[in-house]
Image (cartoon, helix red, strand yellow):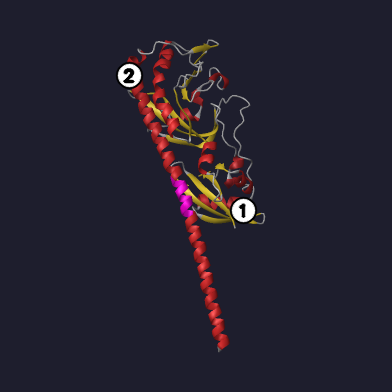
Amino acid sequence: MKRLKSALLFFFVTMVAWQCSQNQAKDQDNHLLFELENIASQINRDFFHIRKMVEFYSHYIRGIYENQNRLRDGLTRSKYAMYEKTVLYKPEDDGGSALFVSGAVPVDDRIRARARFTEFFDLFMKPVVDIYPEVSQIYFNDPESFCRIYPYFDVLMVFEPKLDVRQFNFFYLADEQHNPERKSLWINKPYVDPAGRGWTVSTIAPVYVKNQFVGVAGIDVTIKNIADRYLNSEDGIFLIVDHEGLVIATEEQGAKILRLPPLVNHKYIATIRSNTFRSEQFNLLKSPTREIREVAEAVIQQNRRDVVLSIAGEVYSIMSAKIDELGWTLWQLRGL
């Protein structure tokens, strides 16, 4: 009888201890998921505000256009020069924006006047870059390949004469054909920035003056800035994945675990003449490794928030949280 009581007591104590350990593990998982959701919510809020800022910028540009004659009268000293009788540009950095007019449309007095009154864009552009640490640059492009962009850089080192800006997604996705609702939007698939800042995502908004499309306002965020600001943590390995399975950003260790090529910044060997996107090698849904494909399907297609990846003798817990503003998912990997 004593032996039976001892056995029952041992069983009871063991079950209580097991239940406590299970509860502790569950509490820890809930805490980690809560922290992950906080990071995803922060990204979502920040990028929502940046998109709203490009809307305000487009309204500001419209106001400058509507008052251009008055504003132009106050600008008498020319800051601009011609390169090879084709490109209108600003040769010196005066603390304001750069200007590049490619000559795809011949530079005439209209365009020279536009260069002068758009100097007032600087009053809006500079504070945006100062306020938002994620933002790399802010700009305005028009159908005549007129570009004003801040911060200043040597445009002749980056852009080619007669570049047609209408061929780039950060322009045409906001035009009348592609965006009839005239809304702000995110280009949430990384592309190589023609201005030399590497892999980039952008928020853009059309500018209409008296119901006429005059150009596109844009704000860029580099993938490097995203990784540095949001993924630099000691609490596991983080990555951001889009709704098609493409890895947007991760740390070096995350790339190794998921059998990805190194996510290095783009090296500019030549000028960028057309849209350049990340290759399908970075798509987890198309990974040659079955275990990675299955995990990606579970998170992206089945909306599972807590899955396990077992690969090459290692086991990892993967938790995820949505970033609705961009259609992305934030993942956190932890070794088990």
Q: Residues within 10 Å of mark 1 (few under 14, many from 20)?
A: some
Q: Write down the region rendered in magenta.
A: 33-41
Q: Quadrant of the N terminus?
A: bottom right
Residue 128 location in percent, x, y? 42, 31
Q: Which is more foreground, mark 2 or mark 1? A: 2
Q: Quadrant of the C terminus?
A: bottom right
Please name the residue shown 53% across and 17% down the image: 162
Please name the residue shown 52% across and 51% down the image: 299
Whether pointer 2 and pointer 1 mark residues with C-beta atoms closer than 8 Å, the reply is: no
Q: Is residue 180 visible?
A: no
Amino acid under disc 2 = Asn
Gap between marks 2 and 1 measured at Cα: 60 Å
Of residues 219 and 125, the one nearer the viewer is 125
Please name the residue shown 51% across and 49% down the image: 300
Location of residue 26 with respect to 92 vertically, above or below: below
Residue 234 marker = none
Relative to 49, is 82 on the left or the right?
right
Name the secondary structure under disc 1. helix
Name the secondary structure under disc 2. loop
Q: Is residue 19 located in the magenta-colored stretch of the structure?
A: no
Residue 3 location in percent, x, y? 58, 86
Amino acid under disc 1 = Glu
Q: Residues within 10 Å of mark 2 (few under 14, many from 20)?
A: few
Q: Earlier in the sequence, mark 2 or mark 1?
A: 2
Q: Is residue 77 visible?
A: yes
Provide the residue designation for mark 2. Answer: 67
What secondary structure characterizes most of the magenta part? helix
Q: Is residue 36 located in the magenta-colored stretch of the structure?
A: yes
Location of residue 117 with respect to 295 vertically, above or below: above
Relative to 81, is 279 on the left or the right?
right
Provide the residue designation for mark 1. Answer: 291
